[in-house]
Image (cartoon, grey):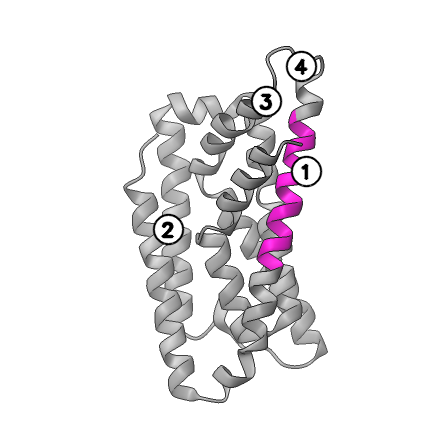
Amino acid sequence: MTLSFLLTSLIVVASPGTGVLYTLAVALTSGARPSVAAAFGCTLGIVPHMVAAMLGLAAVLHTSALAFAMLKWCGVLYLLYMAWQALRETGALAVDTGAAAKARSSRRVIVTAVLVNILNPKLSIFFLAFLPQFVAADEPQPLARMLELSAAFMAMTFAVFAIYGLFAAALRDRVITRPKAMAWLRRSFAAGFAALGAKLAFAER
């Protein structure tokens, strides 16, 4: 596990994106535990892209305009749906109370977080270009090496996202007690999801 891989991974993971935005949204409106669930879901959402990169399926997205476009527009529509949900004060930005509600909320948070990452074709292509750079040409077991690197990347993703979430959750009480602040927060997250959806819409292979 080289220092260059760890530093590059940290920069990629810590950079603001859909996963970070969703984790922050959950933390500020639902608290610490749901934010950890969001971090876990975002990490799980990486698995299909890792597998696709290792099996060469990401190359199909890179070469097939139709496959790339289909997955891309599913992602765009889902991000716009999340933006609409944020404006309607439901979904990602709903404040749940009670044990049963919290259990349902955690499951919903994980599923949503997984979908956020799965429906982004750029992730598969990123890992197709990213992982092989850190596998030596004379590596006797390249697949095992890629699995090792993938596990490290996922562990780092979960840790960084959880830190983001826990930090935001610590500020939660100052936000949810102020209706105007909550309204501004919902609009900000809605705008963020919409902007990321627009960015994905213009993404090319």
Q: Amino acid at mark 1?
A: Ala
Q: Which residue is mark 4?
A: 139
Verify CB contact (< 8 Å) between mark 3 and mark 1. no
Is residue 149 within the magenta segment?
yes
The quarter of the picture where residue 52 lies is: top right
Q: Which residue is mark 2?
A: 77
The quarter of the picture where residue 7 lies is: top right
Q: Amino acid at mark 3?
A: Leu
Q: Amino acid at mark 4?
A: Glu
Please identify, in this view, whether the residue under mark 3 or under mark 1 is nearer the observer. 1
Taking the image as shown, residue 18 lies to the left or right of residue 35, namely: left
Q: Which residue is mark 3?
A: 55
| Label number found at residue 151 | 1
Q: Main secondary structure of the magenta part?
A: helix
- For mark 1, give the secondary structure: helix
Q: Position of residue 179 (x, y in %)?
A: 42, 87
Alpha carbons under labels 1 and 2: distance apart: 30 Å
Which residues fall within the magenta stretch? 146-162
Verify CB contact (< 8 Å) between mark 4 and mark 3. no
- For mark 3, give the secondary structure: helix
Residue at 37% across / 86% down in the picture? 180
Residue at 31% across / 33% down in the picture? 204
Please identify, in this view, whether the residue under mark 4 or under mark 2 is nearer the observer. 4
Alpha carbons under labels 3 and 1: distance apart: 16 Å
- For mark 4, give the secondary structure: loop
Q: Amino acid at mark 2?
A: Leu
| Mark positioned earlier in the residue sequence (4 or 3) | 3
**Quarter placement of the N terminus:** top right
Q: Is residue 181 above or below residue 70?
A: below
Residue at 67% across / 14% down in the picture? 139
